């Protein structure tokens, strides 16, 4: 009997097991090719000199499963050692009836009378790739998190945390593989596509052997008690059948969302960062980072009319460090008394400088109420695991290892030797009490600074079952439980820079709303956009990403209008979250106007595709958002300093040409938002292009040409009708285009309409203003003294056969 046997299959995949070696394989059934072959399933095998492999008895069972992904079949393979010191290994493989991926899980049974600790599980190790295939034009992309750089890289090899995508040409056929983390609880995921090792027992280095490794790992590991069976709730994802790399990654993003119950709260407002505005190197040097200063900013925003468009969030950052007071700060205490005593960044003795909470808003409850009464949203800031020295002295058992013996050691502020133990019941109860008290006070969101300080790779947990990953997640989970499901939780996930290297992870999916992708920076540069844009498949769906606050000034001078509008477009289109480093009073009318074009924010779980990621430069310059089958929004971005033409074909194979993915048999109206420029009618077989200044972005609406009048743009919102137009309908019977638009009080609302051969003659509810580009292209102008949803009915007549323009009625 042949030792290899197919144990599980559905319409897409076949899973086989070699009963003699224990290696397993996955095949793409439709294409008839191996996704990978002969992979080992290993637990805690160090990648060095090979130890003797223990013989194992291999058994398996199949059973139906029903999970949040639907109905399917699960294969459970048990590897029971007959000698040595290994635990029983349990590999779980699931195939679903309606899903295009393989879900992987694992467990162990401790067969010994002593506890064991599990650090690394290789669900796939040495799975051979590309069997019988050629590998042409390979490209890889890591599934970046936080401030980790992610660019499309040439070649097929990559080592990545979280996950990775590999795409290549096998002759005339494109093939793509996406592998990575799925459900997160106690372990992180790593993925490698790499030249590998092959052999049983003794490893043989062979650069020609190309393999896949997919692992669950944690530096501290999971303790399993004697005789216990531990079934991990962490799972992994593998899609080897979706050929299109855009669709493959978007499928991964959807699965990551479902697996972690991720539903990031929509940040439908700008956030003013009190700390950034107060600095001289990033902001204005305007000392507003205290309760009274930020309440005043909300008052100014209200007076200037911002609340007609959107609320304003203000973040009070009590970022005191311990340099000036022997390590004592407000951190850990987290109460009004200490926030009153310690000022933002002063680092002095309590009482020697004004605190973060100042009269008449000397409590968080008073601060939050004052902000909310003015129509604002109150936020604050916590240092993740940087306890005040006096707090550590008061609660030594709440620190890692219950050890404060290094408290006298000086250190950079973000690299303390003494840190919180997030597994300790007493500290967790304290933290939850703090969050519930702040929720009662009216706090709506928090930024966690230096979260890498909460990455305790060396352990030291009072609950020895905790992994490093689980303890890190607990920081944010306690906040979510205490502040509630609607709170805005922000992870400044820069990684590195601790005594124990901290990776940048997706592990907080389903808990955290926002991850930051860059260090402190109020300027803008191309890679900021690509760090967000190349995670489009997770953006808005799993996390919101943003690159720190942004200022309308650089070195004290206003940014050029095209550069200001560029970063606003990028933030509105790619990020969905805008943080400001410019105070309300320092904004010119033009700055204020441009800011309001982003609100309300783009909602939903879709983000724009970086369609030229495989065909362009290091940083994509063309992004497309599909509003409907007839309407797309395209952002063209000049990442360089010199003027140049940016463009893309409207139709074609998106992976091969970087096209916008439109219908080649159709024609499209093209309209650029910021310049209010009508670009004409483009053939579906044609090319969209614009010459842009260095650093400039264009936002182009592309609507399929209808056989009747249609909307082509508005001046209200950069999405040009998606947020502010409702129920737009054409009636041929009465030759009228009608609907409703959301008009802001005191501002002209312009609805740009093309008649497509019909000539507008009258409009109920608005005025008609001619445009120069063509006689059937007009702006419909609305005005109201208050915010109002206004109805219009625009009447048309068919163009005369002679081409004579009908006379327009007065309006």
Image (tube, helix red, strand yellow):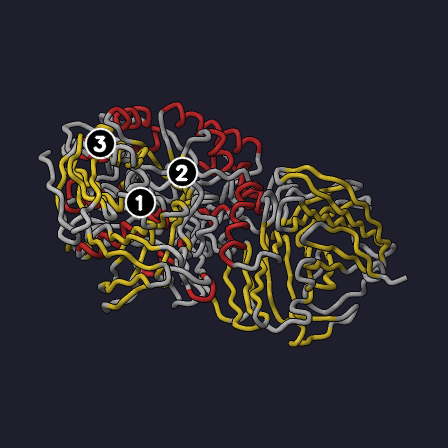
Q: Position of residue 575 (x, y in %)?
A: 36, 48
Residue found farthest to the right: 1
Q: In this view, does 290 lie above or below 178?
A: above
**Front position in the image: 695 or 315:** 695
The first of marks 1 and 3 along the sequence is 1
Helix, strand or loop status at disc 3:
strand
Q: Is the residue marked by circle 2 packed among few (<14), some (14-19), or many (20+) residues within 10 Å?
A: many
Q: Which of the labelled discs sits on residue 331, or is there none?
A: 2
Q: Which of the labelled discs sits on residue 566, or is there none?
A: none
Q: Quadrant of the N terminus?
A: bottom right
> Closer to us: mark 1 or mark 3?
3
Q: Name the residue under label 3.
A: 792
Helix, strand or loop status at disc 1:
loop
How far apart are the two marked residues, 2 and 3, measured between alpha carbons?
Answer: 56 Å
Q: In this view, does 609 lie above or below 369?
A: below
Q: Is the residue marked by circle 3 packed among few (<14), some (14-19), or many (20+) residues within 10 Å?
A: some
The first of marks 2 and 3 along the sequence is 2
> Closer to us: mark 2 or mark 3?
3
Point 46% across, 56% down: residue: 496
Is 106 on the left or on the right of 621, as rendered? right
How far apart are the two marked residues, 1 and 3, measured between alpha carbons?
Answer: 33 Å
Q: Which of the labelled discs sits on residue 578, or is there none?
A: 1
Q: Quadrant of the C terminus?
A: top left
């Amino acid at each position: 009997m042949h030792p290899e046997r197919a144990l599980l299959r559905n319409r897409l995949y076949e899973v086989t097991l070699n009963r003699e070696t224990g290696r397993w394989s996955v095949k793409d059934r439709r294409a008839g090719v191996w996704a990978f072959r002969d992979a080992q399933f290993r637990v805690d095998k160090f990648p060095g000199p090979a130890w003797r492999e223990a013989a194992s008895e291999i058994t398996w069972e199949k059973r139906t499963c029903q999970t949040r992904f639907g109905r399917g079949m699960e294969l459970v393979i048990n590897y029971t050692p007959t000698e040595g010191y290994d635990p029983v290994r349990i590999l779980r493989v699931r195939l679903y009836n309606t899903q295009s991926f393989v879900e992987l899980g694992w467990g162990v049974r401790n067969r010994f009378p002593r506890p064991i600790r599990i650090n690394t599980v290789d669900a796939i190790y040495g799975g051979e790739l590309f069997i019988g295939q050629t590998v042409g034009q390979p490209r890889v992309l890591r599934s970046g998190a936080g401030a980790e750089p992610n660019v499309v890289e040439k070649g097929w090899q990559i080592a990545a945390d979280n996950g990775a995508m590999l795409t290549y040409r096998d002759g005339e056929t494109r093939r793509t593989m996406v592998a990575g983390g799925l459900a997160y609880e106690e372990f992180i995921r790593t993925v490698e596509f790499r030249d590998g090792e092959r052999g049983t027992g003794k490893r043989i280095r062979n650069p020609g052997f190309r393999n896949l490794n997919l692992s669950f790992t944690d530096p501290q590991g999971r303790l399993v008690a004697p005789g216990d069976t531990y079934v991990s709730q962490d799972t992994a994802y593998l899609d080897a059948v979706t050929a299109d790399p855009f669709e493959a990654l978007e499928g991964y993003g959807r699965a990551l969302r479902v697996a972690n119950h991720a539903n990031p709260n929509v940040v439908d407002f700008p956030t003013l960062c009190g700390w950034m505005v107060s600095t001289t190197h990033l902001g204005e040097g305007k000392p507003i980072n205290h309760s009274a200063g930020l309440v005043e900013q909300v008052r100014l925003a209200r007076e200037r009319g911002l609340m007609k468009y959107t609320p304003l969030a203000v973040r009070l950052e009590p970022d005191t460090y311990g340099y000036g007071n022997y390590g004592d700060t407000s951190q850990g205490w987290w109460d009004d008394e200490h926030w009153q005593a310690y000022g933002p960044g002063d680092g002095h003795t309590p009482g020697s400088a004004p605190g973060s909470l100042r009269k008449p808003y000397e409590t968080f409850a008073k601060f939050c109420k004052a902000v909310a009464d003015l129509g604002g949203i109150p936020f604050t800031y916590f240092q993740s695991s940087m306890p005040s020295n006096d707090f550590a002295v008061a609660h030594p058992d709440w620190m890692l290892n219950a050890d404060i013996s290094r408290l006298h050691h000086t250190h950079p502020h973000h690299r303390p030797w003494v840190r919180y133990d997030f597994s300790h019941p007493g500290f967790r109860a304290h933290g939850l009490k703090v969050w519930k008290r702040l929720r009662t006070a009216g706090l709506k969101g928090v930024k966690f600074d230096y979260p890498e300080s909460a990455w305790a790779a060396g352990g030291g947990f009072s609950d020895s079952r905790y992994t490093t990953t689980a303890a890190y997640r607990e920081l944010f989970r306690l906040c979510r439980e205490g502040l509630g499901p609607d709170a805005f939780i922000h992870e400044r996930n820069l990684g590195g820079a601790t005594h124990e290297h901290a990776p940048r992870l997706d592990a907080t999916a389903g808990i955290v709303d926002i991850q930051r992708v860059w260090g402190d920076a109020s300027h803008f540069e191309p890679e900021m956009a690509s760090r967000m844009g190349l995670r489009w498949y997770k953006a808005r769906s799993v996390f919101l990403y943003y690159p720190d606050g942004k200022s309308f000034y650089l070195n004290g001078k206003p940014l050029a209008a095209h550069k200001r509008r560029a970063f606003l477009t990028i933030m509105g289109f790619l990020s969905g979250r805008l943080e400001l480093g410019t105070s309300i009073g320092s904004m010119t009318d033009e700055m204020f106007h441009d800011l309001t074009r982003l609100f309300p924010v783009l909602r939903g779980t879709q983000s724009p595709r970086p369609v030229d990621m495989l065909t362009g430069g290091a940083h994509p310059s063309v992004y497309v958002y599909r509003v409907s089958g007839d309407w797309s929004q395209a952002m063209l971005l000049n990442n360089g300093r010199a003027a140049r033409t940016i463009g893309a074909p409207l139709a074609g194979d998106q992976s091969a040409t970087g096209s916008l993915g439109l219908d080649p048999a159709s024609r499209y109206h093209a309209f650029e938002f910021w310049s209010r420029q009508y670009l004409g009618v483009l053939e579906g077989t044609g090319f969209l292009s614009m010459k842009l200044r260095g650093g400039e972005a264009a936002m182009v609406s592309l609507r399929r040409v209808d056989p009747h009048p249609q909307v082509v743009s508005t001046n209200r919102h950069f999405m040009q009708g998606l947020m502010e137009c409702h129920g737009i309908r054409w009636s041929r019977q009465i030759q009228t285009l009608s609907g409703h638009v959301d008009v802001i009080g005191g501002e002209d609302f312009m609805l740009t309409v093309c008649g497509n051969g019909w000539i507008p003659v009258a409009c109920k509810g608005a005025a008609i203003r001619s445009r120069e580009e063509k006689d059937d292209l007009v702006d419909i102008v609305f005005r109201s003294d208050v915010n109002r949803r206004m109805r219009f009915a625009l009447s048309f007549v068919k163009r005369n056969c002679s081409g004579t323009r009908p006379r327009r009625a007065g309006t």
